[in-house]
Image (cartoon, rainbow, N blue to C red):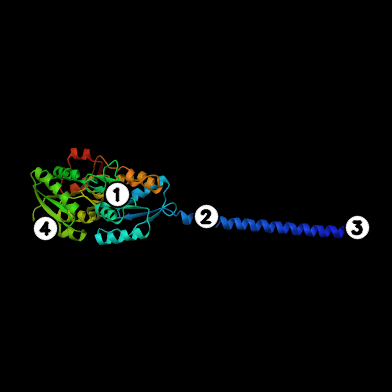
Amino acid sequence: MRRDYKWRLRVDWLFSWAERVTNIMAQSAFVIAVSVIGALGVHAQEMASPRPKVGVLALSNADSIDALFDSLREFGWREGETIDIVFPPASPNPAKLQDNMKLLLAAHVDVVVAQTKLAISIAKQSTSSIPIVMGALNGDPVKEGFAVSIEHPGKNITGSFYNVTSGGGERVGVLKALLPKMRRMGIVVNPVSSPSLAHAADIRAAAEARGLAVEMVPVKDGSEVDAAFSVAKEHQVDGVVAVTGAEMFAIRRELIAAQDKFRIPTVTGSIGYAEMGGIAKLGPDVPALWRKMAPAMDELLRGRKLASELPLVTLDRFELDLNIKVAADLGLVAPDALISEATRVFR
């Protein structure tokens, strides 16, 4: 009996051990099954809800675009983690921009950020459903047909703008303060750009109102700057004011080189110009304007509002950057009154 008992104990133990192994295997299989199902569920969720995509249609690789995405990080939008950015190579060429817009549409972007009037126009012609965010439009968005009103854009476009025309006359004033004896002034303009020509007309009116003779300094790109300034020098142009926009931003270095080579003081509205060696920049703080677009972008990406419901944003004042070292190198003295008005002074 004892032996039978021992055998029975061994059998019971064997069955008990087998039952435990079976339970463990069953539990393991259950855990694995749950893990696989969970992984499939996460994958399905990712497939159903991919990261939002923001497409960028730009004429130049401006720092202001980085300022926007840096500000978006404060709202939790980080490239490669919570958001994807589709940014084809920037180009001022209309045909290239058309191709870039097709790439953005093929990528199924959720929002298009468009830099300058040309890019905004191309984006507007390409889609009436995808939200378009204007990046610091130079001009009046209502007159341009991009919005019904500032407070209620009413279309698939929102974003930022500033009044570039008022800054042109102020830049003439800055140049005149640096060159009180100036008689003949040049205007750097892109002769094949309608916005550039319109801005040049406003600058001309402001210069002529001060009794100045005016000459156009036409440049389509950076390769034409040196030759255009050479002609301006031959025509005894004393100083130059450039129109504002991405086209002029893209040729800042060429303008500075021509200013130094031909000793023609040149004032622009391009951010960073005076810091890089230009004599003066008067214009909006464009990166700050792009940063102001971040709250609207957040609303669009989260699907809480439509572009038509998001008011346009702008800046109320322009900033003066003055490089008094460059002024001295050109034989000029910046008046104290002008220095006191400057937001930043480079020495």
User: Mark 3, residues whose alpha carbon is within 10 Å: few (<14), some, or many (≥20)?
Assistant: few
Residue 344 x/y as whole percent: 26, 42
Image quarter (top left, top right, bottom left or bottom right) of the C terminus: top left
For discs 2 and 4, the disc positioned in front in the rendered view: 2
Which amino acid lies under the numbered mark 1 shown in the image of this protein?
A: Gly
Spatial distance from mark 2 to mark 1, Cα to Cα? 36 Å
Spatial distance from mark 1 to mark 3, Cα to Cα? 93 Å
Residue 155 x/y as whole percent: 30, 47
- Name the residue rendered at 19%, 44% in the picture: 167
Corner quadrant of residue 254: bottom left
Q: 61 or 43: nearer the eye?
A: 43
Q: The residue tagged with tag 3: helix, strand or loop?
A: helix
Q: Which residue is mark 3?
A: 2
User: Mark 4, residues whose alpha carbon is within 10 Å: few (<14), some, or many (≥20)?
Assistant: few
- Name the residue rendered at 18%, 60% in the picture: 224
Q: The residue tagged with tag 2: helix, strand or loop?
A: helix
CB of mark 2 within 8 Å of CB of mark 3?
no
- Name the residue rendered at 14%, 55% in the picture: 217
Q: Which residue is mark 1?
A: 135
Q: The residue tagged with tag 1: helix, strand or loop?
A: strand
Q: Is residue 93 visible?
A: no
Q: 83 or 22: nearer the eye?
A: 22
Q: Which residue is mark 4?
A: 231
CB of mark 1 within 8 Å of CB of mark 3?
no
Spatial distance from mark 4 to mark 1, Cα to Cα? 34 Å
Question: In the image, 83: left or right of 230?
Answer: right
CB of mark 2 within 8 Å of CB of mark 4?
no
Q: Is residue 2 visible?
A: yes
Question: In the image, 159: left or right of 336?
Answer: right
Which amino acid lies under the numbered mark 2 shown in the image of this protein?
A: Val
